[in-house]
Amino acid sequence: MSPNRTESSAPGVEGVIADHLAICDGAKAAGPQGTVVFCVSTDDPAEGKGDLFVALGLARALSRNGWGVRLWPMSRWNDPLPDADVVVSMIESFVPGGVAAGTVLLGWVRNWTERWVELPFLAAFDGFLASSAATAEEMRARYDGPIGVLPIGVDTDLFDGAAEAPRPVDIVTTANFWGAERELQGAIDSVSEHHRIDWYGQNAEHLDLPDGIVHRGSVPFEELPAVYGSAKLVLDDLIRPAKAFGNHNSRLFEALACGALPITNTSSGLAELGLSDVPSYGGETTLVEVVDGLLADDTGREAVAGRLRAIVRDRHSYAARAESFEAFIAPVRSAGRRQRPDWLGWATEVRESLRTAEFALDETRSGLHAEQQRTRNLRSELDQTHARLNEVATRLRAIETHPVYRTLSKAARVAKPVPRPARKDAQGRPKSSE
């Protein structure tokens, strides 16, 4: 152990969860190496946001190396940041107007590369980390400062289990649905005709899935190792902005660390990770062809999964990422800070005003959507009522045209009523009806 390295809490799932909660609560903000602040969408793990868990993975590893680490969620982006040696922006929408002039400002471009390179304040950053070589190249065309490659990694203390073969579940996926249709949704239909797929993730109620897919809803982050550890195959799915630059998901590393074999929708970016043997689909190769071939060859599949698992655990742990981060940050810290324009503070306020307006608009849209859904439900109920009335009318017409009904109806019309005897009083006179 290096002189600056500190012990983490208990190993395993409980220790990782305890560390995550401590980081979220700000209990690990101080350290002899300095303090690193991660600007994230949220500091609430229950929201299931990917940028948060990536930040927690690297933060936990840095904490063990003697760094203080803390989170700065979107809800506080309009406030001046606390004292920090390094600030890492995890999201392109963060405007760094509250970052002190002497603080190292980094951006970690893990996705949405096209949005990052269009930022009007790129020159205000002291350096960038890119999760793929293609993204780093794109950034170099727009930014003349230090750029390093730092892919997403995996916490091997949490994603540690490799279940004994045979694994009880053939196929799982953990893709969340955030409103835009994913490529996986179209490719998975033909697979579900022959194999059952367990789908975990957010917003299941908005997905229209075929019968062969069982959606089990979202699970807490700490339960994902059990999901991957029980599966033979894990279907991965890079969204279009990530696929364009080979920016792979945490799912790739986490599944492999647990001994499952992922299938991705692109081979781009795998070779630079040492993971070119990860199967992929697209072009002339369909997902169902890849799945059928892998499930038919247990020995071959398990051999590939085992070999790739060893690579991930050796090269792609967050402990390894922390070392790469420290190597990149050392010369950046020793260099002078870049000039940050005065209008960044104003831009931060404007951005937060826009964000507040966007939230209000989203709430309005949500309410409108709820009313539209209520209207659709009422219309559906009305249509069903009309259908039932039409059915009753049809049955009545059938009864009225039936020979028996017509005979009875005719007999009723010709039949004469029997007159009732008139009522009389005691003197024998007719009684009034009043």
Image (tube, rainbow, N blue to C red):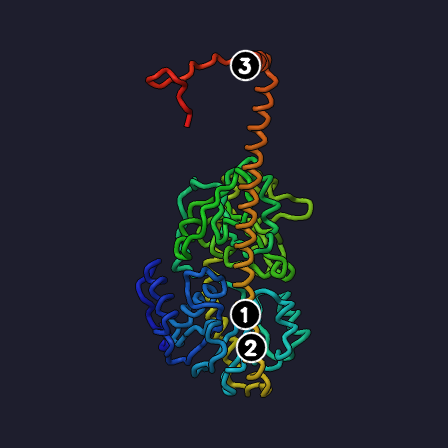
Q: Amino acid at mark 2?
A: Val
Task: Indicate the amino acid at tag 1.
Answer: Ile
* Residue 302 can be seen, yes or no: no
Q: Residue 423: image x %, image y %? A: 39, 17
Q: Does 151 sit above or below residue 411? A: below
Residue 230 at x, y percent in the picture: 42, 45
Amino acid at the residue labelled 3? Ala
Q: Residues within 10 Å of mark 1 (few under 14, many from 20)?
A: many
Q: Secondary structure at mark 3?
A: helix
Query: Vertically, is 22 above or below 238?
Result: below
- Give the SS element for disc 1: loop
Residue 157 % position (x, y): 38, 60
Rendered residue at 46%/67% (across/down): 42
Nearer to the camera, 127 or 88:
88
405 and 223: which is toward the camera: 405
x and y, in percent, of residue 176 in the image: 51, 54
Give yes or no for contact between labels 2 and 1 (Cβ–Cβ under 8 Å).
Answer: no
* Residue beneath the point at 59% across and 49% down: 184
Give the Cα distance between marks 2 and 1: 9 Å
Q: Is 297 placed left or right of 63 in the picture?
A: right
Residue 10 quadrant:
bottom left
Which residue is label 1 attached to?
A: 91
Q: Residues within 10 Å of mark 3 (few under 14, many from 20)?
A: few
Q: CA distance from mark 3 to mark 1?
A: 84 Å
Q: Is residue 106 above or below residue 380?
A: below
Q: Which mark is residue 412?
A: 3
Which residue lies at the image location 57% right of the left edge and 36% below the top edge?
A: 386
Query: Would residue 25 appear left or right of 282 to someone viewing this image?
Result: left
* Residue toward you, 283 or 372: 372
Q: Which residue is mark 2?
A: 95
